[in-house]
Image (cartoon, grey):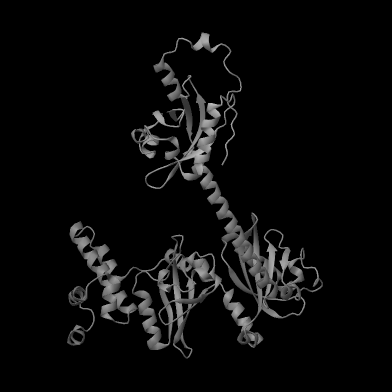
Amino acid sequence: MQWRISALVKTFVSPDASLGELDAQSVATLIATASDIALIVDADGTIRDIAFQSDELASDLDTSDRWLGRKLLSTVVADSRPKVTHLLADAAAHNARPKWRHINHATSDGRSIPVLYCAVQVGTDGRMVAFGRDLRAMSSLQQRLMTAQETLERDYSRMREVEARYRLLFQMSSEAVVILDTVRHRVVEANPAARAMFADHKDEAAGQALSDIFSADTLESVQAHLGAIRVDGRPEEFPATLAGTGADVQVAASLFRQENATLFLVRISAQSPAVAAMPDVKRKLLKLVESAPDGFVVADSSGNILTANAAFLDLAGLANEDLARGESLERWVGNSGVELDVLITNLRQRGSVRFFTTAMRGEDGRVSQVEISAVAIGNGGGPSYGFSIRNIGARLQTENKSARPLPRSIEQLTELIGRVSLKDLVRESTDVIEKLCIEAALELTGDNRASAAEMLGLSRQSLYVKLRRYGLGDLTAHEQN
């Protein structure tokens, strides 16, 4: 690289008067200060003295002691030797505008240090001063720029290849694909399979509305689903009906960004044969379950959710069904880890359970009192369970407001106030509450002592001790087992 920097644009007017009294030390200081590296070179190119502005540069150039007495040509790489020759020749010719030349010094570890030199002859014996500027920072920036440019070119080439492949896939896909504007729900682009679905605009799809694709009775549902996807950003699949043919289809929509804009990618496919062949009455029943005010969940034999309706998602505080699918029902249902196991055990044994009262925890921390009715369904590969979940919190509040007689044991305790000490009264109250809790746990678990102990947070032996204390259950048969 040839560097051409204008130098000595205007010389001193009277150097003899202004600089005549300078001694050698002052001149040396000026030379050393004016450059990152300064070389005093003989007429034959031998280095007689050297000065550095920084120890780092001196260290990278293998110290100045190894250069003294050597030819300047021997310190540079091969392709810089012609530049050194021209540098010294320009200085010897007393050129009033000497050229700056980019010279690379060789190091013992195989690296090269770039330095920009300008040489000026001083005195009458042919001695020259070479002023050098360290170019390592500039060289590093240039190298980083070149690397960045190469990376950008590779990425740009890769993106063009990817875009070409996906453009070909978009055009040749047998599945209808439409790109929609997220604000106006207008068609931005559609592949040939999608354009065939348009009612009156098969040739020109861009700019058309959703009403050209979907029928009037499902248009509002499609717009609502797209609005929900735009808010939470999660892909969703939903049914719809085409405007042109009246065929029932499945629509899968998701968000993506392109050129600082957010768009919908909508895939439209025919419903599966099983859904298409379903009687109209059955389809209506499914729609009723989906929009029922009570939560409805279908789970596998392990209690993992397969599908759930909107009411359950509302109770659980979930934005869409994808967040619930595959998760254990135990995450939201039950006061303790054993309640869902008790419920599923009863389902396996009896086939159905009614009015199982428990709590449901939402993602937002809300806790609702619910009543569950469940049924087991055999589907060939293994049982599935359907859970109907009703929020009974409002009903319980109404019942609590009505006057109900206290349990006999509590009444007896209140009658003791004033007759016995508070300490004894508290002890009696604790015993009553403990007994009531144990009876409730045994009733919920169908007299399963192990499950009841886990529900109460007791060991089995501790539960047996308390059962003997309160005279609950037939302990002899259980202990023999």
User: Residue 226 in the image: x percent, y percent?
Assistant: 64, 65
Quarter holding residue 291 = bottom right
Q: Nearer the viewer, residue 216 or 371?
A: 216
Of residue 284 and residue 191, the one placed in the foreground of this image is 191
To which quarter of the image does residue 198 belong?
A: bottom right
Task: Indicate the position of residue 153 as horizontal and vertical percent values.
Answer: 60, 56
Q: Is residue 302 left or right of residue 248?
A: left
Q: Residue at x 39, y 38 (%)?
A: 61
Q: Give the residue drawn at x 48%, y 19%.
A: 124
Q: Position of residue 403 (x, y in %)?
A: 41, 66
- The foreground one among 46 and 317 is 46
Quarter-of-image position of residue 456: bottom left
Vertical placement of residue 20 versus 346, above or below: above
Q: Residue at x 36, y 83 (%)?
A: 345
Residue 354 versus residue 337: which sits nearer the camera? 337
Q: Is residue 430 visible?
A: yes
Give the side of residue 25 with respect to residue 274, left or right.
Answer: left
Residue located at (31% from left, 70% from top): 407
The N terminus sits in image quarter: top right
Instruction: Spot the residue most to the bottom.
Output: 380
Residue 156 appears at what percent x and percent y?
61, 58
Please give left or right for residue 326 compared with residue 63 in the image.
Answer: right
